[in-house]
Image: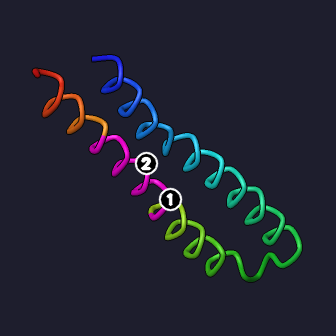
């Protein structure tokens, strides 16, 4: 059971990477809007798309962790 928990923990770490990525993207978008306010709409569209893709990687990691626990946890 110990190795299963370690594997699931590593899979869940993708959420940390996604959080860091979304934070960096948001800060850069805020800087871009401050420098060029007329491009706010385009910047927001790109930011939302990037955040959605980053969040998807975190969800994939969570799903993999659940699969590891549920499929190997009972053995």
User: In the rendered view, would you say 35 is above or below 13?
Assistant: below
Report the residue at 55% width, 50% height from top. Answer: 18
Report the residue at 30% width, 27% height from top. Answer: 4
x and y, in percent, of residue 19 in the image: 59, 45
Q: Quadrant of residue 9?
A: top left
Q: What is the quadrant of the N terminus in the image?
A: top left
User: In the rendered view, would you say 48 is above or below 41?
Assistant: above
Q: Quadrant of residue 5?
A: top left
Q: Which residue is mark 2?
A: 58
Q: Residues within 10 Å of mark 2 (few under 14, many from 20)?
A: many
Q: Which mark is residue 29?
A: none
Give the overall secondary structure of the magenta segment.
helix
Q: Which mark is residue 54?
A: 1
Q: Which residues are magenta?
A: 53-64
x and y, in percent, of residue 49 in the image: 49, 70
x and y, in percent, of residue 45 in the image: 55, 75
Front residue of this view, candidates 39 and 63 = 63
Report the residue at 89% width, 74% height from top. Answer: 35
Gap in Å between the C-alphas at discs 1 and 2? 7 Å
């Amino acid at each position: 059971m110990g190795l299963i928990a370690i594997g699931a923990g590593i899979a869940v770490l993708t959420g940390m990477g996604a959080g860091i990525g979304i934070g960096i993207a948001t800060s850069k978008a805020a800087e871009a809007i401050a420098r060029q306010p007329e491009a706010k709409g385009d910047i927001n569209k790109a930011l939302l798309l990037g955040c959605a893709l980053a969040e998807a990687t975190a969800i994939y990691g969570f799903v993999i962790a659940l699969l590891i626990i549920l499929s190997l946890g009972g053995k």
